[in-house]
């Protein structure tokens, strides 16, 4: 849909708001934006009304835009993460953002509901098959495809959203800060022999089965960036495994993902797992939940790498995580974190019985 067509069909013009609409038209410009499908999309920027199907994207856009004003619709799973985490407190107006834009849970769009929101742009996964994004294309919506699997892809997504928001310089600074942190950790941890790196297992599911992240996952990247070895590197992607396989891997550290309900106490109390080194040595940790979950890539990923690196190699990573979080949250959200908020993000209470965690809690 062209910029002029979107203006004519917008609810502002349809309601007769000609003066306001013209003011908006003067502020926005037609932009040829290349999405992560490699498709050049004609979009009005800065966008006034954006709908997000990918779950991490709305919180990233809020960090770039420092506002919820232009987030017109989002995946219900995004709202759930905001409700559970701190972003709902930073931006309480998120509760007014419509979430009925999918059919059930997942990425299949409710096209009629999205069209009723009159978006300037719709962001959709470019990695979930052709049909979920083609449905939006066929409806004549302005669609930007997003790839969010690896760090380079998330960096590209942040830059694309920065252009869409008319805040390219800010998006670039977010990406650069992430890169600088990655370089810092590489310098601190790069000379550690593989044999000296803890074997880390990321469980995306542990409440009634064991789903692990293998070598092609983002969790694998985080583990390696933080100076660990992925105990499940022999498998690719994410996969459900047996208890017997868990016992064979015998990880030194277990990470519990944020898309599940399991906590360290669940594993410490499970008689089947008592021979696993991570359980025996109390090195099971729930992954933090900040502006978004720290498991998948996001604008907060540098904090996730730093958190894990500090747990794996406290003698080499001298970064004060709590001070670092305050700095990042001021930069990303203009929000001064209180001690209690940091404890909540880090699951200080739930991780409190785990080795080395007392130093991360408020004193």
Image (cartoon, rainbow, N blue to C red):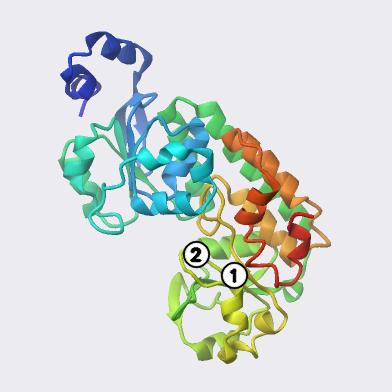
Q: What element does badge 1 sit on?
A: strand
Which residue is at a point 52% across and 66% down the rendered structure image? 257
Residue lying furthest top: 19
Q: Quadrant of residue 48?
A: top left
Q: Quadrant of residue 98?
A: top left
Q: Earlier in the sequence, mark 2 or mark 1?
A: 2
User: Is residue 231 at all visible to an observer of this figure?
Assistant: no
Q: Compared with residue 267, is residue 272 higher up or lower down, i.e. above or below?
A: below
Residue topped by disc 2:
217
User: Is residue 110 at all visible to an observer of this figure?
Assistant: yes
Kindly report the distance in space between the C-alpha atoms of the residues bearing marks 2 and 1. Answer: 14 Å
For disc 1, the neighbor class at 10 Å (few under 14, some 14 to 19, many from 20) is many
Q: Compared with residue 50, is residue 101 higher up or lower down, i.e. above or below?
A: below
Q: Compared with residue 196, is residue 131 higher up or lower down, i.e. above or below?
A: above
- Camera-side residue of 331 and 346: 346
**Quarter of the image that includes the C terminus:** bottom right
Q: Compared with residue 34, is residue 256 higher up or lower down, i.e. above or below?
A: below
On the image, the x and y values in percent for residue 247 come to 58, 89
Which residue is at a point 72% across and 53% down the rendered structure image? 185
- Camera-side residue of 266 and 43: 266
Residue topped by disc 1:
255
On the image, the x and y values in percent for residue 85 come to 52, 52
Single out the mark in the foreground, 2 or 1.
Answer: 1
């Amino acid at each position: 849909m062209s910029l002029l067509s979107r203006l004519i069909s917008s609810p502002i013009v349809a309601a007769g708001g000609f003066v306001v609409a013209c003011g908006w038209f003067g502020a926005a410009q037609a932009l040829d934006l290349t999405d992560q499908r490699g498709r050049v999309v004609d979009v009005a920027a800065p966008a006034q009304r954006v709908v997000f199907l990918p779950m991490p994207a709305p919180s990233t856009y809020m960090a770039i835009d420092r506002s919820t004003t232009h987030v017109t619709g989002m995946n219900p799973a995004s709202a759930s993460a905001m409700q559970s985490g701190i972003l709902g407190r930073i931006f309480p107006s998120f509760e007014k953002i419509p979430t009925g834009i999918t059919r059930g849970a997942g990425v299949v769009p409710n096209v009629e509901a999205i069209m009723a929101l009159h978006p300037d742009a719709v962001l959709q996964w470019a990695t979930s098959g052709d049909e979920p994004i083609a449905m939006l294309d066929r409806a004549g919506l302005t669609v930007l495809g997003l790839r969010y699997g690896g760090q380079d892809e998330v960096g590209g997504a942040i830059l694309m959203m920065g252009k869409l928001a008319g805040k390219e310089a800010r998006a670039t600074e977010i990406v650069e800060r992430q890169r600088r942190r990655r370089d810092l950790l590489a310098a601190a941890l790069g000379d550690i022999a593989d044999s000296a790196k803890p074997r880390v297992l990321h469980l995306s599911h542990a409440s009634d089965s064991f789903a692990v992240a293998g070598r092609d996952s983002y969790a694998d990247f985080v583990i390696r960036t933080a100076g660990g070895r992925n105990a499940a590197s022999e498998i690719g992607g994410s996969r459900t495994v047996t208890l017997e396989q868990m016992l064979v891997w015998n990880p030194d550290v277990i990470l519990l993902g944020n898309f599940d309900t399991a906590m360290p106490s669940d594993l410490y109390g499970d008689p089947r797992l008592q021979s696993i080194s991570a359980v025996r040595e109390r090195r099971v940790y729930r992954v933090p939940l900040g502006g978004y979950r720290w498991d998948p890539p996001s604008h907060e990923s540098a904090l996730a790498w730093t958190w894990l690196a500090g747990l794996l190699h406290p003698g080499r990573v001298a970064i004060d995580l709590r001070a670092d979080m305050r700095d990042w949250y001021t930069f990303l959200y203009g929000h001064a974190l209180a001690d209690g908020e940091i404890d909540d993000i880090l699951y200080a209470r739930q991780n409190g019985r785990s080795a080395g965690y007392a130093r991360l809690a408020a004193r």
